[in-house]
Structures are given as structure tokens and as C-alpha cells.
Amino acid sequence: MPDGSAGVNGGVLVISAEDGPADTIVPRLLAVGANPERVRILKTIRDSHGERHLEIPSDVSVIERAAKSVEAKMIIIDPLVAFLAATVNSFSDQNIRRALAPLSTMAERMGAAVLIVRHLNKNSDGSPIYRGGGSIGIIGAARSGLLVARDPDDETGVSRILASTKSNLGPSPVSFRYTLQPHLESIRVCWGGESSHQATDLLVLPSGEQELTTLEEAGEFLRAILEEGALPAKDVFRKIAGAGFSNRTVKRPKTVIGIVAYRSGFGAGSAWVWKLPTKGAKPPMKDATTPDLASFEQTIDSTSIKSSTSPKSAKQEELATFAEKRSGIEEDL
């Protein structure tokens, strides 16, 4: 850690959809001297219907059992959107808060920290707190928020800055500079000291690029909130404001998508309603909110990882609950 401490004093549960355990996660653990017996990697689970992807919130009990198997003090979910159930709208504040509430309760019960990873959206307006993908409810449910961005003072593009976007449990921490350096056959974080850059400084884009990315993100947002059906215009504008967009920003994407606005009801009780066009009426904007789940093709559900003398030897068959070693809590999942 930046202060020289060793980090987590306990087990760790890694729920990952993007990195391969054998070629990425395990070598990185071994490179920094982690105890592989205290780590569990979880990608998929097995039930009466066979093997399937882990889902939040319905599989929180599975997450808890896996975490208890290594007495986890940290649970990493990378990225969150890859594990949200299909019924959860990641742009809906209500949906997100309901999905994360069981996870929060579980973490409190276990005395563990849950680290959620999400990617940046393309909205460069307003506060950095709005730059995380999905609903504002995600950062709203968190006690702390951290941003990783390129170091604007490093022309080589190697250095990164870790900055705070939210801190409910204490004063806002200082920003830290770091690089990723080769170590053994993997990499490790090398801290470079404090940085004067704050989160707000790190996400500024040139005006032309900023306008384009904001419009794209606004279009994606409109499609997401209207996917489940028509909404009164006043609710649409409320959600738009909550996501950090201005009413003016969404006018162009509204036209491009072909959103239909119509009057519902009669007299004083009538209201304007927005809905998505009928399929085939207009070509939709590219939906960039659908996560690329290619990494799910590698199905892995492992308990503790066997120790190895070399990261290179940490091959897939050495992760504890592969075909020949399906034991422990595997059957219970």
C-alpha cells in the first residue's frame, strides 16, 4: 500500500469477468508475495441446471459462502456490470440500490470490505462522481470512491494517478502517483509518492471530444432508462439530472434515437410521456452499455490457490477446484 503496509490481513475473494486466473490473477498474486491459500477466485457457479454465470443480487448467499471459505476480509467484483442480473437496469437508481443492498448487508455481517470495479462513462460534464458507468446509485451506496486516471504530467503515458472522488468515513485522502513495473513474470504496483492532482483535474477532455462523448453517453443513458417501457417526461428529466446530464444535452440523442413523445390523458391530469421507437422504425444508436463477456468463455471456479515457486508454474490445473479437485464448498454452490 502507499504507506508501506502489507494491505489486507485476511482472505480475499476475487470475482472477475475480465482477467484469466492462470495467466493474470495468480501470477500477479505470486509476484507480490500473496498467500495463495487465502485467495479464492470465483467466475461461475453450478446448480441443478448446470454451470452458469454468477448473478447479483440473487447469488449473494453463494458469494458469502465462498468468502467464508477463505475468511475473506476483502471481496473484489471486477467489473460490477458483468455480474448484475439481467433484470437489473444498471442505469436505474432504484434497481441498483436494491441489487447492492444484500451485498452491503453481507459485507457488514462478515466484517469485510467489498471493492467494486466499474469503467468510466463518456459523460465529461460535471463532477467526477458522475463519471462511473451506470447509475449514480452505485457510488451513492459506496462509502468511498476512487478514480484511476493517466498522470497529466507524464508525457510517456506510463504513470497513473489514484484520486478520491468520495470519502464518507473520514477526510478526503491525498492523491497518489504510481506505475506498473515488471516483476518476476508478472507486474506489481510501484508507488511514486503524493500528487497534487485531484479527480476533477484528471478527466478534462478537449472541447470537441468532450461534446462528442457526452452526446454518446446521453444517448446510451436514454435507451437504458426507457428499455423497460414508457416514462413520464418529468421522470425522464429527473433521471437525466441525477446522472449529471443537462436537458439540453439529451435533445440531440433523443432525435437520433427517434424517441417518441406523446400526451397521455386528458385535461389537467394529462402528462407528456417518452418511449423508445418501435423496433425497425429507426436504426438505434450503438449500445455500448452491453458488457463484453468474452472472458466468461473461460469457466473457472476455484477454491484456495496452491502455492507455487514460480508464477509461470501457476497453471490452470493448479487452481484447487478444477475437474480433478471439485471439493469443499463446490457442491454447495
Image (cartoon, rainbow, N blue to C red):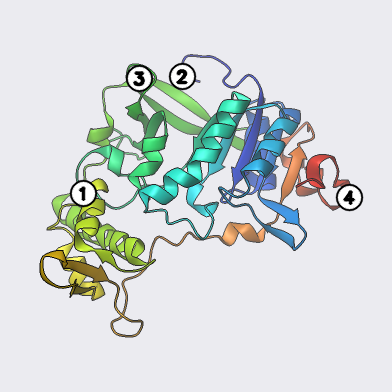
Q: Which mark is residue 324?
A: 4
Mark 2 sits on what residue? 2
Residue type, mark 1 in image: Ala
Q: Residue tagged by mark 3?
A: 173
Question: Whole-percent x and y of residue 13?
Answer: 64, 35
Query: Regarding mark 1 in the picture, which secondary structure is present there?
Result: helix
Determine whether, in the image, residue 28 is placed left or right of residue 181: right
Q: Are marks 3 and 2 in contact (CB under 8 Å)?
A: no
Asked whether, in this view, residue 196 is left or right of residue 228, the answer is: left
Local crowd size for mark 3, using a 10 Å CA cut-off: few (<14), some (14–19), many (≥20) = few
What amino acid is at disc 4?
Answer: Glu
Q: Are marks 3 and 4 in contact (CB under 8 Å)?
A: no
Q: Which quarter of the picture shows residue 148?
A: top left
Relative height, residue 110 to residue 332 (above, below)? above
Q: Which residue is mark 1?
A: 241
Q: Position of residue 111 (x, y in %)?
A: 59, 23
Give the left or right position of residue 198, taking residue 186 as reference. Answer: left
Q: Nearer the viewer, mark 1 or mark 3?
A: 1
